[in-house]
Image: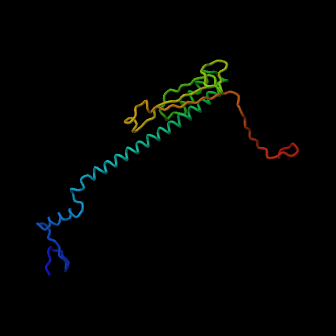
């Protein structure tokens, strides 16, 4: 039994290593569809493009999350500041109520980038097209707070300008008489005028 090569099992023929027969075997392997070194050259480029695309998508999602968080914080702060200012309006007057609202904004937005708040006192006119009319006189019953700013961004400076990323929230609070009231009692039942 004739064998080629040094590690042949009995009854099996192996192709010689090197030489013309080896080259023919490698060429036939490429022709049969097995990838050789020349066919894998674009694989790194493909994986790099997929990786960069994934990073861009992640940065975009982080930017959207930051925009949503800042919008929520701005609106919450405007609402709280307007309520704080309206509570002080009749007691302290226009200037001190506006200062109370300003301090409330600064306390609530310590960790967030924001511009100086715009605080206006005036009159809230229900059922009118204007709604809020700015001014400070005897009929002043409301305060308007506008909070704005530009949140930080990872990808947005590349895609959008600073002005396109500007967020703003406003709120108006009035200290006028309530339109409706609601009360909750702790009495379960009454028997003959006495509470049980």
- Viewer-proximal residue among 102 and 126: 126
Can you tell which quarter of the image residue 125 is in? top right
In the image, taking residue 12 as reference, residue 43 lies left or right, namely right
Which residue ends up furthest to the top in the rendered image? 137
User: Height in image: 123 above or below 75?
Assistant: above
Q: Colour scheme of this structure image?
A: rainbow
Image coords of residue 51 (percent x, y): 34, 48
Q: Quadrant of the N terminus?
A: bottom left
Image coords of residue 48 (percent x, y): 31, 49
User: Height in image: 148 above or below 185?
Assistant: above
Image coords of residue 37 (percent x, y): 21, 57
In the image, taking residue 187 as reference, residue 87 lies left or right, namely left
In the image, taking residue 157 as reference, residue 96 lies left or right, namely right
User: Height in image: 174 above or below 73?
Assistant: above
Q: Residue at x 68, y 27 (%)?
A: 176
Image coords of residue 26 (percent x, y): 18, 64
Which residue ends up furthest to the right in the rendered image? 192
Can you tell which quarter of the image residue 89 is in? top right
Can you tell which quarter of the image residue 174 is in? top right
Q: Residue at x 19, y 80 (%)?
A: 11
**How many numbered dots are placed on residues in this image?**
0
Which residue ends up furthest to the left in the rendered image? 19
């Amino acid at each position: 039994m004739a064998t080629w090569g040094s590690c042949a099992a009995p009854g099996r023929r192996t192709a010689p290593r090197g030489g013309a027969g080896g080259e023919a075997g490698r060429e036939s392997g490429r022709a049969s569809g097995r990838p050789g070194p020349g066919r894998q050259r674009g694989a790194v480029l493909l994986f790099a493009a997929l990786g960069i695309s994934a990073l861009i998508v992640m940065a975009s999602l982080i930017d959207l999350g930051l925009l949503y968080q800042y919008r929520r914080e701005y609106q919450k702060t405007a609402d709280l500041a307007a309520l704080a200012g309206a509570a002080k309006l009749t007691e302290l007057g226009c200037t001190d109520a506006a200062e109370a609202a300003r301090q409330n904004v600064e306390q609530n937005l310590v960790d967030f980038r924001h511009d100086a708040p715009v605080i206006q006192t005036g009159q809230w006119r229900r059922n009118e097209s204007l709604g809020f009319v700015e001014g400070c006189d005897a009929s002043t019953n409301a305060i308007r707070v506008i909070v704005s700013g530009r949140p930080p961004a990872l990808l947005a400076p590349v895609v959008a300008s600073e002005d396109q990323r500007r967020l703003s929230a406003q709120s108006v609070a009035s200290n006028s008489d309530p339109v409706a009231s609601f009360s909750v009692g702790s009495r379960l039942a009454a028997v003959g005028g006495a509470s049980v």
